[in-house]
Amino acid sequence: MTPELVVQLARRSFEVTLMLAAPLLIASLIIGLIISIFQAVTSINEATLAFVPKIIAVMVAMIIFFPWMMSYMSDFTREIYSFIATMRR
């Protein structure tokens, strides 16, 4: 196994991790921003107000994006298994 292959595998793993986490993080970011603007406009300074809407947004995003995430993960898993099969030869 050459260093280039290790770097390529690590890079691809990080890409997959970022792609799978992105929809959930973006949903949480958008809801957090909306709640922060709402708190600034209404002068409500409650730190725990944003937690429940963020959790709900992440759960909804998970439900919406789960089929795509599973497809992406299974494609990556097949890619890794084929990579292992070629490394063995």
Image (spheres, rainbow, N blue to C red):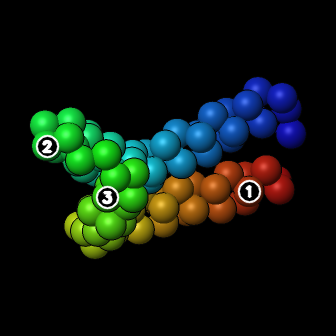
Residue depicted at 59% across the width and 40% down the height = 14
Whether residue 58 is visible, yes or no, is no
Secondary element type, mark 2: helix
The residue type indicated by label 3 comes to Leu
Secondary element type, mark 1: helix
The answer to the question of whether label 2 and label 3 lie on touching residues, with beta carbons closer than 8 A, is no
Q: Is residue 9 left or right of residue 60?
A: right
The image quadrant that residue 42 belongs to is: top left
Compare marks 1 and 2 and give the one earlier in the sequence: 2
Q: Which residue is mark 3?
A: 49
| Residue 55 percent location from the top left of the image | 36, 65
Give the label, 1 or 2, closer to the camera: 2
| Residue 86 percent location from the top left of the image | 72, 52
Q: CA distance from mark 1 to mark 2?
A: 57 Å
Q: Is residue 33 left or right of residue 8?
A: left
Residue depicted at 69% across the width and 39% down the height = 10
Location of the N terminus (image quadrant): top right
Compare marks 1 and 3 and give the one earlier in the sequence: 3
Residue depicted at 31% across the width and 46% down the height = 45
Secondary element type, mark 3: helix
Which numbered tag is attached to residue 84?
1
Q: Nearer the viewer, residue 75 or 33?
A: 33
| Residue 59 percent location from the top left of the image | 32, 70
The residue type indicated by label 1 comes to Ile
On screen, 71 above or below 89? below
The answer to the question of whether label 1 and label 3 lie on touching residues, with beta carbons closer than 8 A, is no
Mark 2 crowd level (few <14, some 14–19, many ≥20, 10 Å Cα): few
Q: Which residue is mark 2?
A: 42
The residue type indicated by label 2 comes to Thr
Give the label, 2 or 3, closer to the camera: 2
Q: CA distance from mark 1 to mark 3?
A: 47 Å
